[in-house]
Image (cartoon, grey):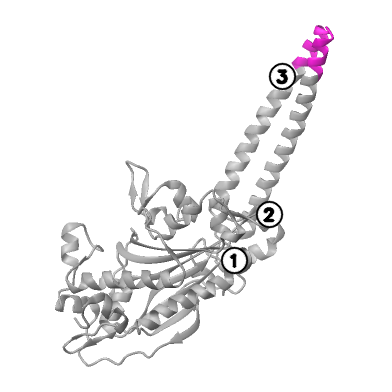
Amino acid sequence: MLLVNQIKENFPEAVKGLKKRNFPNAESILNQAVELDELRKTTQTQRDQIQAESNSISKEIGLLMKEGRAEEAVQIRNKTAELKTQIKDLEDQYSKAEEELIKLLYTIPNVPHQSVPAGKSAEDNEIVLENGKIPTLFEGKLPHWDLIKKYDIIDFDLGVKITGAGFPVYKGKGARLQRALINFFLDEALAAGYIEVQPPILVNEDSGYGTGQLPDKEGQMYFASADNLYLIPTAEVPITNLYRDVILTESDLPIKNVGYTPCFRREAGSWGAHVRGLNRLHQFDKVEIVQITHPDNSYQTLEEMSGYVQGLLKKLELPYRVLRLCGGDMGFTSALTYDMEVYSAAQERWLEVSSVSNFETYQSNRLKLRFKGEDKKTALAHSLNGSALALPRIVASILENNQTEDGILMPKVLHRYLGFEKI
């Protein structure tokens, strides 16, 4: 969540940034946050002053009792009772103001970086670069939802039977392709200096609030009500929460973690080819990279993470492009996001396969994730994450772009993981 001091110090910029997101009543809501903070501070000051007066009187009572002036002590004690009532009232006011402030801050998204373009939807995103040649396929090319039936490698009907729509069953070479991609992505991350973790795929409410999925995306997450736990929408949530309530040292930074998990999202897709097959699922596999960095280095780190994901796409020989998301298409917690899209030659459109984001202090403020510098002072770290990569649309693009009339060729980089070169 936003820091109130940052709102105060950069109020015009914060309002301007939130307007890029089309956040309604930005100025009014930020003013409300500032006023609640001022009320909280004023109440705290008044409470401290009265507490100091009460402490002083208590000492005076002690001296009077020692001197045998009990009557005077009793008279003064009546005043301390009044002061204690005032202190209790002020503490209640402080708690109420603080609770209202935190609730309000939870509803305010991150302020976009100055480079983020204004816009309302994906149509307003900026294309940063394009790479690779779009393949020309033979007449009679098939979209992946027909290819997987033709070669019997993924079964959506079985998934419906077992669970429901959006939960496919991977079979034979389809399952081996999934495993090959996961291992390839993990090995590449390890070679790039990331430390692998295998986190839980259920998280508690504190973890959801820590990374900003709650309360913003509560309706999109599967909830196990008996235990008050949520199935993760991404490994970002448990991995970043490893550092909740932690004070690091500056020498610990940057921290680089990678993790593979299944991911779960309740969001229901609309009808149409753009959500058919693997294009949108309720359960899917993903390898996630997370970094915790010094604030001075986070935007350089973002560029490095973007370049790393692009390197994976190059090795898979997939044509891709990089987008800088506009304010209206960004995630709630992000300050700047790059999306990577691969071209699907059979569907003849771009498919998002990765988002790489810098959250600056938005998550670390919620998480109380700090580091201690050489001057022994503590400061909030910056957090970043990226999909490296999400599997469904990568698989869809591999199948579609590499299809021939007698089979589907596999990217060379996967051959040693697969044990075969062609489906």
The amino acid beneath tag 1 is Lys
User: Residue type at mark 3?
Assistant: Ala
Q: Position of residue 92 (x, y in %)?
A: 62, 33
Amino acid residing under circle 2 = Asn
State which tag comes first along the sequence, 1 or 2.
2
Which residue is drawn at the image coordinates 55% and 55% (left, top)? 364
Chain-order first, disc 1 or disc 3:
1
**Apparent side of residue 94 relative to residue 59 in the rendered image (left or right):** left
Q: CA distance from mark 2 to mark 3?
A: 36 Å
For image coordinates 72% across by 33% down, the residue present is 47
Q: Which residue range is magenta in the image?
A: 60-78
Position of 290 relative to 76 (above/below): below
Residue 61 magenta-highlighted = yes
Identify the mark at residue 19; answer none if there is no mark.
Answer: 1
| 228 vs 82: above or below | below
Q: Nearer the viewer, mark 1 or mark 2?
A: 2
Residue 64 numbered tag: none
Q: CA distance from mark 1 to mark 3?
A: 50 Å
Residue 369: x %, y % from top left: 56, 53
Q: Give the CA separation, mark 1 to mark 2.
A: 19 Å
